[in-house]
Amino acid sequence: MRTRVFLLVMIAAAAVVFFAARMVSNDYVFFAGYTVLQFVVLATAWNILGGYTGYVNFGSAAFFALGAYATVFLHKLYPLPIPLLILIGGAVSGIVGLGMGYLTLRLRGAFFAIATLALAVVLQTLVVNWDYVGGSRGAYIIRPNEIALIGPYVQYLFLLMLALAVISLTVARGIERSQLGYGFATIRDDELAAEASGVPTLRLKLIATTLSGALMGMAGAPFPYYIGYLQPSSAFGLEYAVNSIAMPMIGGTTNWVGPLIGAILLGSLQQIATVTISSAVNLLIVGLLLVAFVIIAPNGIVGLVQNWMRGRTK
Amino acid sequence: MPGALLEVTGLSKRFGGFVALDGIDLTVAEGERVGLIGPNGSGKSTLVNCICGTLVNESGSVRFNGETVDGLLTHERTRRGMARSFQLPRPFTTLTVADNLRVPLLYTVNARPGHALSPTELDARCAELLQLVALADKARHLPRDLTQVEMRKLELARAMAAEPKLLIADEAMAGLSQSEVDDIVGLLIRLNEHGITIILIEHIMRAVMKFSQRLIVLVSGKKIADGMPDAVIRDPAVERAYIGQ
């Protein structure tokens, strides 16, 4: 399927999701759905670096928070429409991703992961001490209740996140089928052999960190409007770092379907747990599922299905 | 030397206090078939890594095709026409056998000016290369389904896919049976007849003697002999290095 056709199919699917959600006349569906979609974007973005090139990023929360705080900063300066804020948040996180890549991509494996974690800690410290965006007290964003054409504001935010999910899935799938995708896969498999085959590994890794960071920043940009009150500990929350790793791992990291399945599955489970048990159980669920999958299906749900299909054709 | 494709001058490489290569000079002419031998640990693979840019040499210089390539990254040297196979096969494990060959076609051949291959041409080139090394029926398999011999053939095919001027085959035949060795030597000689200059690093003397027009011997990081194969193996210094006094 060509990328353009895929995009149209995704837009159609997104439209179905949106109108189906409107049929349920309850704003909570949009409220919970927004979180799940946000994880679809984060998981897909993480997978571009972590799944395709094999570089594990523990600092997802930092890129997400950068997008969110770019919004807070601009909101105080001069309120802009959210789609524009998404672009700006993406640009800020993309640039930081590029910079992080330059500084850390000579490290491999666990060392790279530790460096990304350190980046998150450094950025959080900076934000906590930056009074203009609220510092450790946090910042309030007053959002309108309604918006023209759509109605409730949460539906508008849901629609924006739906669009971001469509964009990130299309980007991820487009990469997989392009020359870039082959290059990323060779980096994951063997960087030395990749260089010997003519793959400019450093340049490709920088492309991956930039793209991945930018998509995470885009996911973070509308967040202050969604939550209404943003503090460093919620924007830099552990749940973003953990979920954006766990979701692709559980779904499967080798193609775009994995993070989508992982995010929908884990995201919905967490929403259900939040209303039925307690929001504190969320990370426990993620942890237990991750352990279970590492043991039973190290290649995630997609890997499980692929093995099963290969077994049937033999 | 006129028509020199590769010129290495005064190349040295240390690992900490250990001198792995000590002032190596060598020249390879265009179209030549050169054998490079030496006992284990004599620095053959280190030399290959320095020529290809995988390791950075402390002193000395590498000229390739009339251009100094010092400081260029491996992929830049590959694009200029230098290809290598690895001593232990390093296939891209998550890509199919055909896609393993597609990578150098996309990133090396297509990156050269005026060489853009269409998707159908790419498929055809992959099939052609697989035919050449008799792996056509494994095209859609993953490398883990291949035998050791097939893995080595894939390694060679991937180096050839980059359409090199110079091919450095690092122990492409270790562990193969006699008839398989003959297969690969025949393949390398055919490639050479198509104009590719080849440096063969090998322990199997039968293969080296059959293949080489010239033989270079490394011992403990120094070049101790360079010349006609028959003369070189009778050289007392070479005998001493291999058999002892």
Image (tube, rainbow, N blue to C red):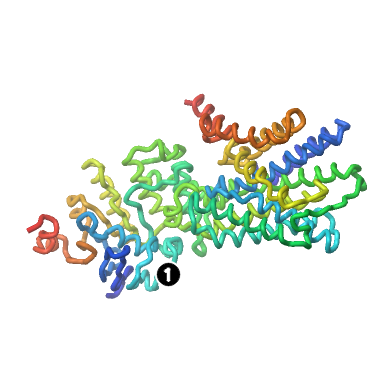
Q: Is residue A239 visible?
A: yes
Q: Is residue B110 visible?
A: no
Q: Is residue A223 left or right of residue A282?
A: right
Q: Is residue A98 left or right of residue B91?
A: right
Residue B194: give x, y in percent of width and height.
Answer: 33, 57
Q: Residue B75 falls in which quadrant of the image? A: bottom left
What type is the residue that disc 1 sits on? Gly
The residue that label 1 is drawn on is B71
Residue B153: give x, y in percent of width and height.
Answer: 34, 45
Which residue reaches farthest bottom?
B1
Q: Residue A159 falls in which quadrant of the image? A: top right
Q: Is residue A225 left or right of residue A168?
A: right
* Residue in view at x 29 percent, y 73 percent: B9
The chain carrying label 1 is B
In the foreground, A228 or A297: A228
Tag 1 secondary structure: loop
Q: Is residue B102 above or below residue A281?
A: below
Quarter placement of the N terminus of chain A = top right
Residue B105: give x, y in percent of width and height.
Answer: 47, 53
* Residue in view at x 85 percent, y 62 percent: A78
Mark 1, Cα crowd under 10 Å, few <14 / some 14-19 / many 20+, is few
* Residue in view at x 61 percent, y 60 percent: A98
* Residue in view at x 87 percent, y 45 percent: A153
In the foreground, B28 or B218: B218
In the foreground, A222 or B2: A222
Q: Residue B232 falls in which quadrant of the image? A: bottom left
Residue A297: give x, y in percent of width and height.
Answer: 53, 31
Which residue reaches farthest top?
A312
